[in-house]
Amino acid sequence: MITLESFVRGAWQRGNGKPRPLQDPTQETDIALCDSTGLDFAGAVAWARATGGANLRRVGFAERGRWLKALSAAIHAQRDALIAVSAQNGGSTRGDAKFDLDGATGTLAAYAKLAESLGDENFLPDGDGVQLGRTARFWGQHVRVPRPGVAVHVNAFNFPAWGMCEKLACSVLAGVPAISKPGTPTALVAYRVAQVVTQSNALPEGAFQFVCGSLGDTLDWLGPQDTLAFTGSAKTGAMLKGHARLVGANTRVTLEADSLNCAILAPDVGDDADTWSAFVNHLVTDLTQKTGQKCTAVRRILVPRDRVEAVVETLVDRLSRIAIGDPADEATKMGPLASGAQFEDVTKGMKALATVARTACGGPVKLKDRGFFVAPTLFVANDVEADVLHSLEVFGPCASVLCYDGSAAEAVRLANRGGGGLVASVYANDKRWTDDVVLGIAPWHGRIWVCSDKVADQAYAPGMVLPQSIHGGPGRAGGGEELGGLRGLDLYLQRVALQGDQGHIGRRFGRSNPDAAV
Amino acid sequence: MITLESFVRGAWQRGNGKPRPLQDPTQETDIALCDSTGLDFAGAVAWARATGGANLRRVGFAERGRWLKALSAAIHAQRDALIAVSAQNGGSTRGDAKFDLDGATGTLAAYAKLAESLGDENFLPDGDGVQLGRTARFWGQHVRVPRPGVAVHVNAFNFPAWGMCEKLACSVLAGVPAISKPGTPTALVAYRVAQVVTQSNALPEGAFQFVCGSLGDTLDWLGPQDTLAFTGSAKTGAMLKGHARLVGANTRVTLEADSLNCAILAPDVGDDADTWSAFVNHLVTDLTQKTGQKCTAVRRILVPRDRVEAVVETLVDRLSRIAIGDPADEATKMGPLASGAQFEDVTKGMKALATVARTACGGPVKLKDRGFFVAPTLFVANDVEADVLHSLEVFGPCASVLCYDGSAAEAVRLANRGGGGLVASVYANDKRWTDDVVLGIAPWHGRIWVCSDKVADQAYAPGMVLPQSIHGGPGRAGGGEELGGLRGLDLYLQRVALQGDQGHIGRRFGRSNPDAAV
């Protein structure tokens, strides 16, 4: 059985503690061991700052973008091998594995593309300059510059490739080295990707380190120029955010946590509308893709009261035809949950939802003797006001239908009961109704996906995270932001106001400098 | 003696605990009592959200800007009365009081002016739209919308008017109601300003509340849409930022804390340069204005080794001629420290600096039998590496000269030893040297003020905070951001990615909508 190693200070290293086994969730067999005990975490932080940071910032944004392009190509070249690992360690179907891997390479490539317009300087102008004095000679210009610290990336198990690479794309392009920690249950996939990263030599020495296992005392070594970017549960997120060292040093912390994403069907969408088809297709995708283990998957489905029966009937029919089984089998549309712990959590969560809802299909049952399989599960709320519907994220192929009166106000009220979400989707053709919903739910969401007949044919399901749009959300969702094009770099940049002679400060640091244009 | 009241839920109210006396720092006599014990803080939070928020967001940005303009005018109309209170409660000279009050009204007016271009919508486009699908029909547009929460503003004692109004300008314009808490030692000034705010009726009901004394259990009632903006010590700041409720709910917290601001003299600036005159004038201003009680005042003066003697001689000469005395006396250039506690802190700090530096003038001595007077104090470091020089902010008329070798690299290294600052100033005419320093210190500062012969005649001293430039800094300075034109609103807005039909989402929410243009 393989023992996963960590890549620290330029070398692959093994922990000296009691290793934790990783499983094949289809076979329930141990396939790898993972441990990082005893590694030199203080040394990793110092190495990142001194060696990685210096190497990254020896060049400007455009050159770092070329490195990302090379990294994207290197990972893409190993696509088939990585798909096989993803099936084995993540229980991912071929489609699920591609979703993760192509998301990773696609995001790296998107940031490489963005970098082409950033020039060779190591600062980015932030907006236009502004007159400060009684004449325009005394001038102000904001710029953003790379922070000379380290980015600690704590990723979730559900996207071992994409999660690591979307964070890496932003920090590397910003000029900040990363220490990346995968979610342990699927660390074998992340480990294989990390090997490609190091073997490709696409990134300079020190820009990338990989801790497979616990982060040990890493956080105790962070300071004012460092950043912790976490994806995972709200509970763990709060523990990290409140860490005394991070609070005391004003280390930047961003969280992407729980989210009770909702899809809202408007009353004007008839059964023959393209928007209706998209609504149904997207829900089936979000419920079953990655076996529902997506932070952006729909958990609450808001349906006008008189349409509930039609929606439930259609979804139950579609979900019942999903082929569940070995992810390596091409006919399989949905694999197992990623781990035994996941299975425990999901079935426990389903039981909690079942106390306030009717089970239309599926339920908290182990489908096969071997493997963490559950069926796509649709609940229909008996009481749409029950807290558990709006606060418990069951991280599996599971969602609840909640009826409402069809008014924008009621849709807004129920959507916002989620306490802050990553994404909400609105299926509607009535623009006025849509605008009321959009502006009503906007403060509580990081992304709103408006599906109408005009875009139903070419739009992705709302669970799809695109590098052009920010990913994150307020409140329960963590209060953080990632991606969103260049906005994703801000986490790793310091914004500073420059004041002085327009002929110098304005020309050198403003948008008119062709090497610094944004 | 007057008992200060709080303005909560639309009424002026008195606490029911043991009041704390406020002093006239010139006479050392009690002049007011302050207490907020027993007020309904949960009710204040609820009132702000329900009544204040709704009233603010009933209109759009442009109309809220007009309210700020009216508020600025109302405060300005009481200028002379407020200057007198500022002398009595803050020990402020007429010039110091104007600096605070005109800063307040000027910032309100600047945001009123900015609002004119924002239109009547209740969202702001965030950047340009972007194609998301295979055609431009599937489109992305980021917008920022007001958060339906409350802003809790915790201000410092040194700028009772400006501190309250600069925070209020941003939250009100953003559409978020405020609960404002002044620094207790100068709460009489803030109380008088707050009375003007409420009597003017410039703001709608619920938009402004004022807690004179402790905030009680206010923080325990905050949630995901609320914001805490704090100005004060790093120690208190860390306590607030780590507050379990704020961490758990992902309440936004921004801190503006300690800062060892530095001024850097370049080796190329001769005694006959305009930049030299500005350097000396600005240092005298920063040391003596507000008796050195400015978070942006210069604390470390970096001087090329062969210029130290000239700098010290000039500064000692200028500082020795500062008239110290009763701030109500027109001849007075510098008044007392604002309180007895300030006097204790400052003299204790001076003693700590004196262990690693020579005292060129001033020192930890009470100048008069009555009143918290100290002399402008200049230290010359014996050992520029001593930690205390870079970590202890002595919040009074006090700074230290540190010699360096004249190289940009050494200036950068010493400046960044401050661990994160609000502002650094660079006095230089050599552009290349300047650029090296600017890019070297940029990650550790929120603002960099570059003074050269081109702008020496019209620029403000670096301690001046302008609404057009961000105010804040990384690390020790708190890691926060305020002001910076529209950037200052972001603390109170939620950014959300909209995705959908360009013909709808792009037109309605993009920059082409004339009512939403930014």
Image (cartoon, coloured by chain):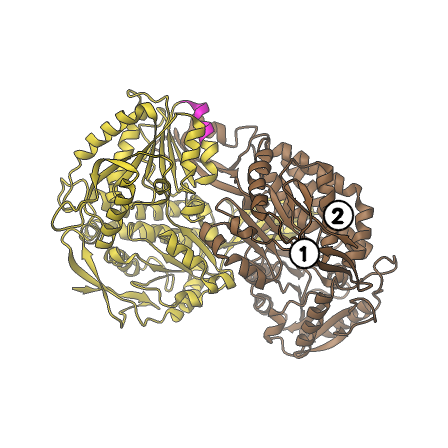
Chain colours: A brown, B yellow
- Foreground of the two, B483 or A50: A50
Could one spot residue A159 in this view of the protein? yes
**Residue B43: image location, x then y, percent:** 39, 71
What's the residue type where badge 1 is placed?
Gly
Based on the displayed image, in which of its 4 quarters is residue A236 positioned? bottom right
Q: Is residue A269 left or right of residue B68?
A: right
**Residue A247: image location, x then y, percent:** 47, 54
Q: Quadrant of the N terminus of chain A?
A: bottom right
Q: Is residue B351 left or right of residue A198?
A: left
**Residues rendered magenta in the picture:** B430-437
Label 2 marks a residue whose chain is A
Could one spot residue A458 in this view of the protein? no
State how far apart marks 1 and 2 are (Cα): 14 Å
**Residue B97: image location, x then y, percent:** 23, 46
Q: Residue at x 41, y 45 (%)?
A: B472
Based on the displayed image, in which of its 4 quarters is residue A170 positioned? top right
Residue occupied by mark 2: A192
Per the image, label 2 sits on a secondary structure element best described as: helix
Residue occupied by mark 1: A183
Q: Residues within 10 Å of mark 1 (few under 14, many from 20)?
A: many
What's the residue type where badge 2 is placed?
Arg
Q: Quadrant of the C terminus of chain A?
A: top right
